[in-house]
Image (tube, rainbow, N blue to C red):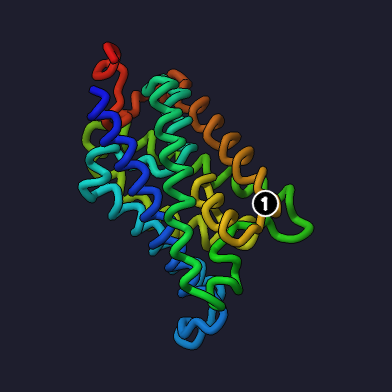
Amino acid sequence: MRRKLLSIYCSEFIGTALLVLVGLSVVIFNNGEGSPLWQWLPSPGAHRALTGFLFGCTGCLITLSPVGHISGAHINPIVTISFLLKRRIFTRHAIGYIIAQLSGAITGAIPLLLWGRQGKSIQYGATVPETGRWPAAFVGETITTFMLVAGIFFFTGHRRLRRFTPFLMPPLYCFMVYWEGPLSGTSTNPARSIGPAVISNCWTGHWLYWLAPLAGATLAVALFQLPVLKWHPVQPRLLHRRLQKN
């Protein structure tokens, strides 16, 4: 069982590292100084929508990959905490997931330094609240995280929809980044935020990318505790019944 857990945590480490490396490479290419995309697609809104869609595609592909099949591809501490609040994962296993996610995010961010000037121009994809609009950024990050967790619960809680859960991410992030991106950068994921923060030393408002997603996740969990929506989302790999003897 220990070997299996190690495999799961390693897969979560790799998945989160890939999310940060590939997802933020997309962000840098699309939005960094000198990006050719500005000539092809000058609209800032279209930029955000495309960036969000491709970032969501990255998460979708990781979930569908062998890495995702091993760990379930939370690749986000907030998703893990949400399943913990729903009592679908033990605390000790959730801690293992979160450690793997944060260390994977920092490791995956290091190669972003190879983007050089283009990456540095946007702090290698670091998320920063819009100046003077921190309350709005907090609310926006709360709402988008609520949408993410509620969407995951809705899909994983329904047997017929469960297999389509990964395909929710591209359109969801396309919409969220287009709508909320100017306020907070639409993180919804502390691991996604901590990676570029470490390599760019840009920690402006970093607390927001923990507290606001936690607030959004808590609201989503509370919603799905209501009798009318008391579905039972499945947490891949680390269900109570499968590890209760561990």
In the image, what residue type sits under mark 1? Ala
Question: Residue at point 49% right, 88% down?
Answer: 39
Q: Quadrant of residue 124?
A: bottom right
Residue that lies at the very extreme toward the right in this rendered image: 132
Q: Residues within 10 Å of mark 1 (few under 14, many from 20)?
A: many
Q: Residue furthest top?
A: 245
Considering every residue shown, the one lying at the far bottom of the view is 39
Q: Quadrant of the C terminus?
A: top left
x, y (%) of residue 88? 37, 22
The image shows residue 79, relative to residue 203, as above or below, that is: above
Split into 4 quadrants, where in the image is the N terminus? top left
Which of the two residues, 77 or 154, is positioned nearer the viewer here?
77
Query: Residue placed at 32% from the left, 40% from the top?
Result: 10
Name the image quarter holding residue 11. top left
Q: Which residue in the protein does label 1 denote?
A: 137
Q: Is residue 147 left or right of residue 70?
A: right
Q: How many marks?
A: 1
- The kind of secondary structure element at disc 1 is helix
- Percent x, y of residue 212: 62, 41
Q: Nearer the viewer, residue 222 or 39?
A: 39
What's the residue at 47%, 30% (across, down)?
81
The answer to whether residue 180 is seen in the rendering is no
Q: Nearer the viewer, residue 141 or 204?
A: 204
Q: In terms of depth relative to the viewer, which is nearer, 245 or 148?
A: 245
- Residue 110: x percent and y percent? 47, 60
Residue at 46% across / 71% down in the picture?
A: 114
Percent of width and height locating residue 121:
60, 74
Q: Is residue 120 left or right of residue 153?
A: right
Can the viewer see residue 94? yes
